[in-house]
Image: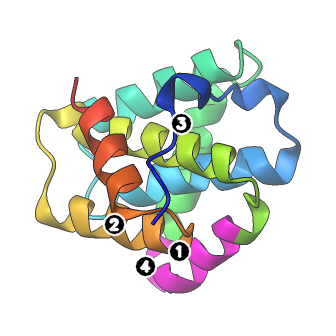
Amino acid sequence: MEPPMAYETTELSLASLELPKLEACVELMFLVAYADGKIEPSEREVFRKHVEEATHGQIGAGLVQAVLRHVESFVHQWDRTQRIQSIAVRLSDQRVRMAALELAARVAVADGQLTADETAFLAHTGAAFELSQADISQALAVAQR
């Protein structure tokens, strides 16, 4: 078993990512926020804030809200396992996967709680990303600080 990844080296700048990778990160953040069937206002705000900050303002609040509304309109039609696999393909680098999982976990805990559905979703995503259980646990711990 490999040791957990070093987290101080997994900072992710969404602004530096190519469009397919950026879309994959944003989609993952949305999917984890929606894992419990709803997106709380606090999750929506953290989602918006992270996307704005991580893209250095290249994607503003209006666009984030438009993307959220668009994705929410058809999320019920998605097969989540297929979406996670699609995200894993687009995020082939392990460091980017780790950073994306941590960003997603931060969105999930934005409302002050990590639900069983969100935890299960993050664990499933981490496994699809071929991350160790220790890495997944560390991403959750970092997000809850």
Q: Which mark is residue 7?
A: none
| Magenta-drawn segment | 75-88
Q: Which mark is residue 76?
A: 4
The span from disc 3 to disc 4 (Cα, nearest Å) is 18 Å
Density class for disc 1 (Cα within 10 Å; few <14, some 14-19, many ≥20) is some
Q: Nearer the viewer, mark 3 or mark 2?
A: 2
Q: Earlier in the sequence, mark 1 or mark 3?
A: 3
Q: Earlier in the sequence, mark 2 or mark 4?
A: 4
Residue 113 is a magenta residue: no
The span from disc 1 to disc 3 (Cα, nearest Å) is 28 Å
Label 1 sits on residue: 128
Label 3 sits on residue: 65
51 left or right of 90 in image: left
Location of residue 31 (image quadrant): bottom left
Residue 107, above or below 83? above
Q: Nearer the viewer, mark 1 or mark 3?
A: 1
**At 25% across and 30% down in the image, what residue appears?**
42
Residue 23 at x, y percent in the picture: 72, 50
The span from disc 2 to disc 4 (Cα, nearest Å) is 21 Å
Hey, what amino acid is under mark 1? Ala
Residue 137 at x, y percent in the picture: 28, 51
